[in-house]
Image: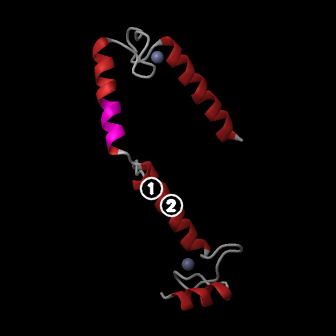
Amino acid sequence: MNKETYALYKKYNLCPDCGNKSMKGNVFCFTCLSYRSEYDKERRDKGYIRPDRLDGRRKEYNHARYERLKALGMCPYCGQRKVTEGYSTCPVCRKKRTYYQRTRKVESRN
Ligand SMILES: [Zn+2]
Ligand SMILES: [Zn+2]
């Protein structure tokens, strides 16, 4: 589809993907919109990360740091305290994480 056709479809509120009537305030029709969001969701569920968010070097560095601290029995999150036995983090970071997860849950419920 070229730019002119796209503009024409948009002008007459038609979905440029299938030619159906588009959703109010949207370029695409309901079917194409839900297909698109489902497709995006599936990609997110599979752990797809947008390429512009990837930083290979940093990832490598973090991994090395994590392994090093783990081997020392230190918390990989803060790198300052020893981990609690049976856990992979120190009590302080565990508390922070639990708090963070709780507040996130509250947010998503609203
Ligand atoms: Zn459509
Ligand atoms: Zn910690």
As measured in the structure, the alpha-carbon distance from the residue carrying label 1 to the one carrying label 2 is: 6 Å
Q: Which residues are magenta?
A: 57-63
24 or 48: which is nearer to us? Answer: 48
| Residue 72 forms part of the magenta stretch | no
> Looking at this view, is 58 or 37 the one in front?
58
Q: What is the quadrant of residue 22 in the picture?
A: bottom right
Does residue 24 lie above or below 73 as drawn? Answer: below
Residue 66's disc number: none
Q: Residue at x 34, y 38 (%)?
A: 59
Quarter of the image holding residue 26?
bottom right
Type of the residue with mark 2:
Glu
Q: Position of residue 9 (x, y in %)?
A: 61, 87
Q: Secondary structure at mark 1?
A: helix
| Quarter of the picture holding the C terminus | top right
Q: Which residue is mark 1?
A: 42
Answer above or below: position of 110 versus 89: below
When the figure is inspected, residue 74 is found, relative to residue 41, above or below; the finding is: above
The residue indicated by pointer 2 is: 38
